[in-house]
Image (tube, rainbow, N blue to C red):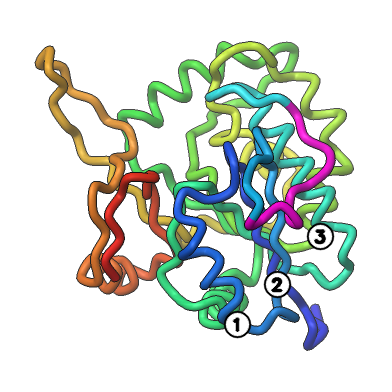
Amino acid sequence: MRLSKNAKVAFLNLSLDSFNHKNIWKKFFNGGDKETFNLYIHSKNKKCSVFKDHFIKNTVPTKWGQFSLVEATIELMKSALVDEQNEYFTLISDSHLPLYSLNETVDLIKQRYDILTFTKHFSFHTKVKSQKLFKEGIKGYDFGEYNAVCQFFVCRRRDVETFIETFEHWSQFFVKEKVIFADEFYFWGVAKQLGMRFKMGQATTYSDWSFRKLPDGKLERNPRSFTTFNKAMLESYRNQNFLYARKAMPNTLITF
């Protein structure tokens, strides 16, 4: 497929607001070629003035782990398709941090993600738990063996068009008001069902899935929030070929 020299990267942010560290992302987007990207934000409260011009109009009420997260992602994709120069689509969240400059990130996405790319889930324990819940959330269709993948994937324009065109059909098989972690299954599952061209490849996003002990002695394994984020961590995650890291919370001390 021959690409236009003006092919853009669309950053799709499913967020409570915009970004936890707005100053870093403002510097990121203002520090590069503005003709190489577009930013789209599905904001739950739309209180952020810094990125208000990037809020999409059509939003859906979202709940943690429910199918509404897939519906919100579809709305982001619909908004991004309006600009015909958007060719690469990368999913991010409010707790993401960029590890490179805008221009470097755009170049790396174009170099690494020639086709729709999913990534294996970081936590086998969470994957098994998610799979059990997910299967309880399917009705009237045999999706076969499905495993959770990282929800922050990269796709191309033709993939986005397919996800949108087929959404009405595939979404009818998913239970809506139930925690099933559908954002970790839906797009990968549909891609498999449709025989779309994709690969399991390099993750865009670093997450710390290590076990930690709770006060009651039980073990928990969810993405760990950063208390600090420094230059050594930045370089380490770059060396592992990540483009972003999460979870950077509002109170995370950023020192790079």
Identity, as a three-letter code, of the amino acid under mark 2: Phe
Q: Quadrant of residue 36?
A: bottom right
Q: Which residue is mark 2?
A: 37
Element on which disc 1 rests: loop
Q: Is residue 29 above or below residue 179?
A: below
Crowd tier of the residue under label 1, counting other residues whose Cα lies within 10 Å: few below 14, some 14–19, many 20 or above: some
Residue 158: image tag: 3
Identity, as a three-letter code, of the amino acid under mark 1: Gly
Q: Quadrant of residue 121?
A: top left
Q: Nearer the viewer, mark 3 or mark 1?
A: 1
Instruction: Give me the residue at 37% from left, 49% from top.
Output: 248
| Callout 1 touching callout 2 (CB < 8 Å) | yes
Crowd tier of the residue under label 2, counting other residues whose Cα lies within 10 Å: few below 14, some 14–19, many 20 or above: many
Report x, y in % for residue 55: 74, 49
Report x, y in % for residue 83: 87, 65
Q: Relative to 235, is 139 on the left or the right? A: right
